[in-house]
Image (spheres, helix red, strand yellow):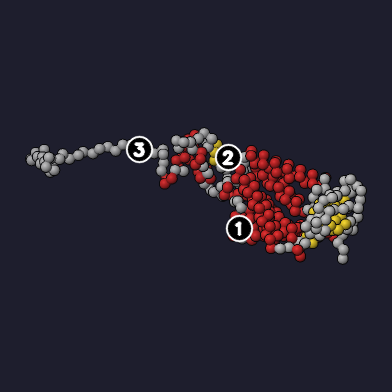
């Protein structure tokens, strides 16, 4: 059976989308299965706990959320001291849902990268480009960026050869596919796995940065940067036919999702309330170690009466002033 462009596309996108759905469903199922599953997803998959980052669940948030770094060099509370306002449970639920979605997308990158790097490879070629390291079937695209000139294979590209197009169109490009599972080695598998782990580390770090910034203008700036850069790259890749790989668009979609999550987190979190000067002093004293209160005034100890000592170290005898009746 000869593979056509339609069959290659169905296999490429169908399996990739299936891996993404399996990863997302697995994360959600683990998150809602039990308390331990929820902790595993938050601590291991997502890598940051939003509830701990902003003290959502602490009942004494008005006292415990005053940070020690809000004190000046002399230990006095600064004028900008703020207290956190607890977020309602409904908002926490929505934040958990979005974190699970981002965690599932992050895990799916590993699965899609392993599939496209070790099972079904794809590459874009221009006239005269070097062929990939593996033999591939190539399909020539003309003015259309979605459909090739013919659904059948336009030419075969072997390793160490040049891409030779059968058309004279100036803007012609070729998109090539090939099954390469039988040509993999342990070294190539480890290389792909290392790239996947690096991508996971990058996105979990960016997610942690957005969560810890919380209700901050920097969150809006980072979110706009992610949405603009990743969304712009997706449009450019489609217009100029530079890539049709599902992995590329999955990574860019995850970047857009991080930006949207930043906006949602900024809107959900309440604005911290400024404390009054009297409350600042009270909060600073409550947060002193060992329960020491700086507001407690200390008085010098009064010296009591001392006994007169004789030169020989004995107390001299004194007659009583009480007269007998």
Residue pictured at 23% horizontal, 39% vertical: 304
Horizontal and vertical percent position of residue 60: 52, 46
Horizontal and vertical percent position of residue 190: 67, 59
Q: CA distance from mark 2 to mark 3?
A: 35 Å
For the N terminus, give its image quadrant: bottom right
Residue 272: numbered disc: 2
Q: Residues within 10 Å of mark 3 (few under 14, many from 20)?
A: few
Residue pictured at 78% horizontal, 53% vertical: 245
Horizontal and vertical percent position of residue 189: 70, 60
Side of 280 relative to 190 (left or right):
left
Residue 272 shows up from this direction: yes
Horizontal and vertical percent position of residue 150: 91, 55
Residue position marked by numbered label 1 in the rendering: 40
- Given this view, does label 1 or label 3 mark the residue nearer the observer? 1
| SS at badge 3 | loop
Give the quarter of the image for residue 195.
bottom right
Residue pictured at 52% horizontal, 33% vertical: 79
Residue position marked by numbered label 3 in the rendering: 298
Q: CA distance from mark 2 to mark 1?
A: 30 Å
Q: Is residue 251 above or below residue 78?
A: below
**Closest to the observer, 216 or 221:** 221
Q: Is residue 300 above or below residue 265?
A: above
| SS at badge 1 | helix
Mark 2 and mark 1 lie on one chain; the one further toward the N terminus is 1
Residue 116: numbered disc: none
Q: CA distance from mark 1 to mark 3?
A: 50 Å
**Closest to the observer, 71 or 93:** 71
Q: Mark 2 near mark 1, Cβ–Cβ under 8 Å?
A: no
- Given this view, does label 2 or label 1 mark the residue nearer the observer? 1
């Amino acid at each position: 059976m000869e593979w056509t462009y339609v069959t290659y596309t169905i296999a490429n996108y169908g399996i990739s989308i299936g891996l993404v759905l399996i990863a997302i469903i697995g994360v959600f199922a683990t998150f809602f299965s039990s308390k331990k599953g929820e902790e595993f997803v938050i601590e291991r998959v997502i890598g940051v706990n939003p509830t701990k980052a902003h003290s959502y669940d602490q009942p004494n948030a008005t006292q415990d959320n005053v940070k020690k770094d809000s004190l000046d060099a002399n230990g006095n509370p600064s004028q900008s001291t703020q207290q956190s306002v607890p977020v309602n449970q409904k908002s926490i639920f929505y934040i958990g849902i979005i974190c699970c979605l981002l965690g599932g997308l992050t895990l799916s990158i590993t699965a899609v990268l392993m599939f496209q790097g070790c099972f079904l490879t794809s590459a874009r070629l221009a006239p005269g480009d070097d062929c990939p390291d593996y033999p591939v079937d190539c399909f020539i695209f003309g003015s259309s960026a979605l459909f090739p000139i013919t659904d059948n294979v336009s030419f075969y590209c072997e390793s160490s050869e040049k891409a030779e197009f059968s058309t004279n169109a100036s803007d012609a490009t070729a998109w090539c596919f090939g099954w390469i599972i039988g040509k993999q080695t342990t070294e190539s598998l480890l290389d792909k796995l290392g790239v996947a782990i690096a991508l996971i580390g990058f996105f979990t770090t960016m997610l942690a940065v957005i969560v810890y910034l919380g209700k901050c203008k920097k969150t809006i700036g980072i979110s706009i940067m992610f949405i603009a850069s990743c969304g712009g790259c997706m449009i450019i890749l489609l217009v100029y036919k530079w890539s049709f790989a599902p992995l590329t668009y999955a990574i860019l979609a995850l970047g857009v999702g991080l930006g949207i999550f930043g906006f949602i987190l900024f809107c959900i979190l309440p604005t911290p309330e400024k404390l009054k000067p009297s409350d600042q002093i009270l909060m600073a004293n409550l947060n002193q170690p060992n329960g020491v209160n700086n507001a407690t005034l200390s008085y010098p100890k009064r010296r009591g009466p001392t006994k007169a000592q004789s030169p020989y170290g004995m107390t001299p005898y004194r007659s009583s002033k009480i007269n007998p009746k």
